[in-house]
Image: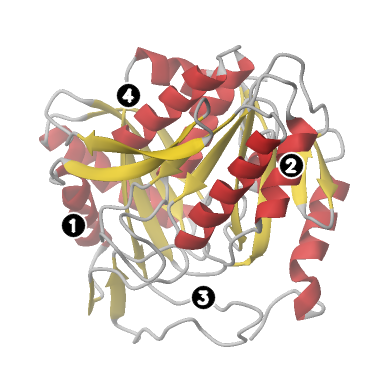
Amino acid sequence: MKKLINAVPDVVKEQLEGMAAAHPDQLKVHFEPNYIYRADAPIAGKVAIISGGGSGHEPMHGGFVGMGMLDAACPGEVFTSPTPDQMYEAAKAVNSGAGVLFLVKNYTGDVLNFETAAELAHGDGIPVQNILIDDDVAVKDSLYTAGRRGVGTTVLVEKIVGAAAEAGYSLDECADLARKANQYGRSIGIALTSCTVPAAGKPTFELGENEMEFGIGIHGEPGQKRMPMTSADEVTEMMAREIIDDPAYSRVVSDWDRDAGDWVDKSLTDEPLKEGDQVIAFVNSMGGTPVSELYAVYRKLDEVCKAGGIEIVRNLIGPYITSLEMAGVSITLMKTDDEILKFWDAPVKTPGLRWGV
């Protein structure tokens, strides 16, 4: 294992200390429990947006704390869910009275711990809502999930809903927008190599020199299949077709009823993409794939979308949701409307994403 670390138990702590030292004007870091929060929080009258998950996916989530995105992020140990006290304490720190929206990737540990944090916050009189991100078309039910995993759409939802909160949306309006944006997003990823969790000291899985994993998860979870390595054009077309041809997807999620103080079932159906749709295209490096290769992927993705009558009207290309040093790529397509484009284009100033300021 070759990594720029000191002692394995200190990996996350020292990374957080580095973030705080590098961006003192934008964020602060609280330890025990660990959370990153906006330097100017709480902001009077503003709904606070909080997300989190295991470390190792940087810049998601901590790198997206700042104006126009997250008010706080809760990092667990590498590839390990944060604990409920992290989200609970973060919520208390950034709540202005307008409430807190938790954006939760669909992994069993994340879901359970964010739900517990929501219940604790509710008990303290903090208005709270949970929205689940479940956009991975590769698999339904996997090593870490019941239902589809939460992947690339997470970054887009954090940007869009963060801007809406900045503009004065209420908690219910932010939650409705987050739910809509999640339902508009679909993602899939592939891996060319494994990654090594520092605590394990060895690769999470093995891939032969001429093999790739199609439909990989962001923690190295198995995908649809292991297959021979192929060209950028061929693999991009396969990934794009999985998203574009994905049929309507229905499931039941747990929704927090603030009046009842309890979880209720909510039925959701994501409609498929169709000819005439406009989309945001997100081509993401899993950590070890250079930006130059991402542009080759985007080139083919644009071609496939045009052939299907789907217009890419915005794009994001780069390493924004990584899996340590894994070589690989993920593609996300999110259908847009005027509301989503308005908040996508809005100014943002975070360590990991910045425009318009």
Give the alpha-carbon distance from disc 4 to disc 1, as whole Å. Answer: 23 Å
Taking the spot 82% from the left edge, 64% from the top edge, the residue there is 14
Query: Measured from the top left, where is residue 173 in percent x and y?
Result: 48, 18
Label 3–label 1 contact, CB within 8 A: no
For marks 4 and 3 on the same chain, the one whose residue lies earlier in the sequence: 3
Query: Measured from the top left, where is residue 230 in percent x and y?
Result: 23, 70
Give the alpha-carbon distance from disc 3 to disc 2, as whole Å. Answer: 30 Å
Taking the spot 43% from the left edge, 53% from the top edge, the residue there is 106
Query: Label 3's element?
Result: loop
Residue 322 visible within the image: no
Label 2–label 1 contact, CB within 8 A: no
Q: Disc 4 or disc 1, which is closer to the eye?
A: 4
Instruction: Identify the colour scheme used.
Output: secondary structure
Circle 4 residue: 336
Query: Measured from the top left, where is residue 244 in percent x and y?
Result: 17, 42
For marks 3 and 1 on the same chain, the one whose residue lies earlier in the sequence: 3
Which numbered circle lies on residue 90? 2
Taking the spot 26% from the left edge, 61% from the top edge, the residue there is 139
Query: Label 1's element?
Result: helix
The three-letter code of the residue at mark 1 reads Met
Which numbered circle lies on residue 195? 3
